[in-house]
Image: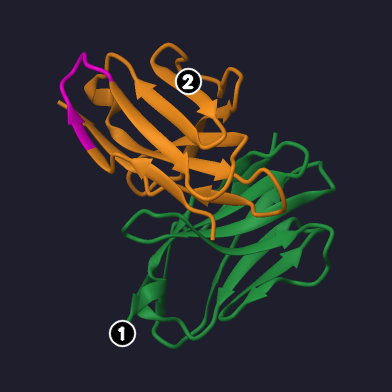
Chain colours: A green, B orange
Amino acid sequence: AQTVTQSQPEMSVQEAETVTLSCTYDTSESDYYLFWYKQPPSRQMILVIRQEAYKQQNATENRFSVNFQKAAKSFSLKISDSQLGDAAMYFCAFERTSYGKLTFGQGTILTVHP
Amino acid sequence: GAVVSQHPSRVICKSGTSVKIECRSLDFQATTMFWYRQFPKKSLMLMATSNEGSKATYEQGVEKDKFLINHASLTLSTLTVTSAHPEDSSFYICSARQVRGRGGYTFGSGTRLTVV
């Protein structure tokens, strides 16, 4: 079974600064997807970024980028130029390409200070 | 983009009654939908996977007879909490995968169920 671990229950960052959220996972699969989802106070799940395991290049979406280390099974999220609207709970998630089911980490609550 | 509509957003029901939650994919077909339960400040726990035209697959520890799932069409899945009790109070979220392409998952806005 796959497991996803987010070791930081809470993180905080000053507005305009950079913060990195950690995620590690355990799998014997070679082909899979990794995701970061954001859940703001509205509780609507929003896809932040997605990474295919076969791609060596790290995914980026504007201020959001990942550091994908496949051998180390690590998938961290970097948020640059943090904004107040980035405050939310962030979940790392794993999907086996052949199975189609998401496994979520425990989540990290991010607070952004003005 | 893909939208999943989930209703109701909030519901309060009396202990012993049943509550139905609907999840609709508005602009795409979803052969597979997922139902999650989430406690405050906790992660999403997958309850079951619903496939159009077939029986749902429940995760270990989820009571099939309490949480009835129906996926009658490519755009609608329902979760019925039967004989609800206060311990069933939680936030329930649905998610759908698009049939084609690599659209990934789209989530509904969730339903807060309170059983009194």
Q: In the image shown, does B15 or B108 lie closer to the viewer?
A: B108
From the image, which quarter does the N terminus of chain A lie in? Answer: top right
> Is B41 a magenta residue?
no
Query: Which residue occupies 42% across, 73% down?
Result: A86
Distance CA(mark 1)–CA(mark 2):
43 Å
In the displayed structure image, the side of residue A15 where residue A69 appears, left or right = right
Query: Which residue occupies 41% across, 81% down?
Result: A83
In the displayed structure image, the side of residue B74 where residue B23 appears, left or right = left
From the image, which quarter does the C terminus of chain A lie in? Answer: bottom left
Q: In the image shown, does B71 or B115 lie closer to the viewer?
A: B71
Residue B66: quarter of image: top left
Query: x and y percent of residue B56 in the render?
Result: 56, 21
In the displayed structure image, the side of residue A77 where residue B107 appears, left or right = left
Query: x and y percent of residue B79 in the render?
Result: 41, 27
Query: Which residue occupies 74% across, 55% down?
Result: A73
Q: Circle 2 sits on which residue?
A: B62
Q: In the image shown, does A41 or A67 lie closer to the viewer?
A: A41
Query: x and y percent of residue B63 in the render?
Result: 45, 15
Q: Circle 1 sits on which residue?
A: A114
Q: On the same chain: label 1 and label 2?
A: no
In the rendered structure, the residue with mark 1 lies on which chain?
A
In terms of secondary structure, what is the magenta stretch mainly?
loop
Residue B111: quarter of image: top left
In the displayed structure image, the side of residue B97 where residue B40 appears, left or right = left
Position of residue B9 relative to residue A85, above or below, is above
Magenta range is B11-18
Query: Which residue occupies 43% across, 38% down?
Result: B23
Q: Secondary structure at mark 1?
A: loop
Nearest-to-viewer mark from 1 and 2? 2
